[in-house]
């Protein structure tokens, strides 16, 4: 099975209550592809960087089974850069700086080998760019997931609604689900969002877990209570990467298997937040992931 | 097994996005005893009302197996009254009015028959009153649970810490756990709160579920995603009543059985919020409760 991931590959400056990290590797596509690489190879990526992006990181991605043919490297230009500061609750953050750089003119180009992708993860980007990727596919993938954010609901709602018609799984947070649907109840929000296109809706609630809605069915995945959360950056992308990695690996689109995918995604996200940038994802082994998934199972296990 | 419940029996004026209810029955002890009455009889209560409290409600409580011997009825005085308004997210509320009335001079007196209680639920009240109840017991109950709130942490912390030394289970919300411990991480907060006395800590997170911490162990109970939440008033008390009702009924203090108790408490709370005041709790049957508990089991069920 092949997984295609689209999104940013970037630099971040991050400040959290645990400390600071400057010009570290970030970007949705980086997190998605690294997380997914623990389940499926190759992970094909479509993204763009400047010539300032470290080659050792690209080499590391290649080593992990990430196919970089679709990564544009713009000579003489700079990579996308984001700086943010998290508050004590780690749920709220301020953006201190955004430098689009190469992203300002990003036009995704799918190499020939990518155009038959069976699984597609459209990371958070302008809805137009997400649509441009879909238009270059030769056939419809088995599963298309899309991540977005309130910014696009505010500034490009029409484009977002257009691309939503073409996706199977939407991943957003609870406030975004409320904004998109105009409903406070997540149960009612899910019903309205299903009508916009996505048969599956995953609502990410950070430290409060995640909900999966399919028409009439709902699954709740907890978040693992952690003693230390160092840096939440990339947790949602890592979740999506783990989820789509699992779906690509297994090829089973049943609701029961989606649940498993969400648990694997949650497990990967729980690692991600333990260190800055992609550091924690780098050291993972299959045994560590399996053990973490078992902790999720134990956390919610009860017998009536 | 006998359960003793202490707390307010009161009137509420409530405004939520769903509507208004004026001078309806409320109070922690009302919700606790009604919820617990679905599991264990009698539920002995210690509380106080004025002569304005409706006798048909007292008759109904009696009919449900609530023992009112410990309920003081003050002639010529008025019952405790609280008025509040909930905002759209239902997690934040403003107190519009508080009239202590009979509560201002409340001195709890335990009838002889209550002094050997095996299970004790100390509902949210001043820590001094909670302590006065403990002092009148002839022997230590098998399980003592205490509910409190940030108000007492701000105004009577010394008294609260004194009474905490004598309880087994503390039920508070996440912000209160953070305030009490000074730790943002709930895992770290739990460790510090265990040292204050309670071997078990239940952190109530409303629509985000509940966490149970025992030394080194943790259990997560989800909240049921509901299409309509009419009135959150009393949900925490109903949760505590369901939990302690289950513990009293079963007499099994193992961690596994505590988990079940938390699921039963969560199920009762999920009913409570569906209507104003105690209306939804009134119509419940054992089959309805069992069906709701099964929904909680289904909600988090997955197989790795």
Image: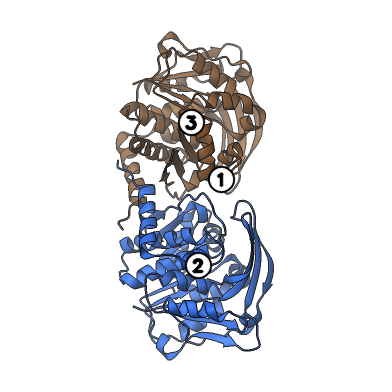
Chain colours: A brown, B blue
The residue under label 3 is A198
As rendered, which of A276 and A128 lies closer to the eye? A128
Residue that appears at 43% across and 30% down? A241
In the picture, the quarter occupied by the N terminus of chain B is bottom left
Q: Is residue A129 above or below residue A39?
A: above
Query: Which secondary structure, mark 3?
Result: loop
> CA separation, marks 1 and 2?
29 Å
> CA separation, marks 2 and 3?
38 Å
Q: Is residue A137 above or below residue A203?
A: above
The residue under label 2 is B237
Disc 3 or disc 1, which is closer to the eye?
3
Q: Position of residue A70 (x, y in %)?
A: 47, 14
Q: Chain of mark 1?
A: A
> CA separation, marks 3 and 1?
29 Å
The image quarter containing residue A281 is top left
User: How many numbered markers are drawn?
Assistant: 3
Residue that appears at 63% across and 54% down? B17
In the picture, the disc for residue A90 is: 1
As rendered, which of A127 and A222 lies closer to the eye? A127
Disc 2 or disc 3, which is closer to the eye?
3
């Amino acid at each position: 099975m092949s997984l295609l991931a689209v999104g940013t590959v970037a630099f971040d400056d991050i400040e959290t209550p645990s400390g600071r990290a400057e010009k570290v590797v970030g970007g949705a596509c980086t997190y998605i592809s690294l997380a997914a690489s623990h389940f499926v190879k190759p992970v094909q990526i479509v993204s763009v960087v400047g010539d300032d992006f470290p080659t050792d990181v690209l080499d590391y991605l290649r080593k992990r089974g990430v196919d970089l043919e679709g990564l544009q490297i713009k000579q003489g230009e700079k990579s996308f850069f984001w700086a943010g500061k998290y508050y004590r609750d780690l749920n709220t953050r301020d953006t201190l700086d955004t430098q689009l750089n190469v992203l300002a003119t990003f036009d995704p180009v799918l190499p020939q080998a990518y155009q038959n992708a069976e699984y597609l993860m459209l990371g958070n980007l302008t809805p137009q760019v997400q649509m441009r990727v879909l238009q270059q596919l030769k056939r419809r993938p088995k599963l298309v997931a899309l991540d977005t954010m309130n910014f696009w609901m505010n500034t490009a709602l029409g484009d977002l609604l257009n691309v939503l018609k073409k996706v199977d799984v939407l991943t957003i947070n609870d406030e975004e689900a409320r904004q998109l649907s105009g409903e406070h109840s997540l149960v009612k929000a899910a019903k309205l969002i299903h009508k916009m296109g996505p048969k599956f809706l995953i609502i990410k609630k950070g430290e409060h877990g995640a909900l999966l809605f399919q028409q009439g069915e709902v699954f709740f995945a907890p978040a693992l209570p952690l003693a230390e959360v160092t840096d939440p950056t990339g947790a949602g992308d890592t979740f999506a990467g783990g989820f789509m990695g699992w779906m690509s690996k297994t090829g089973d689109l049943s609701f029961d298997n989606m649940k498993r995918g969400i648990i694997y995604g949650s497990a990967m996200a729980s690692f991600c937040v333990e260190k800055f940038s992609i550091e924690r994802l780098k050291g993972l082994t299959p045994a560590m992931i399996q053990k973490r998934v078992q902790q999720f199972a134990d956390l919610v296990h009860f017998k009536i």
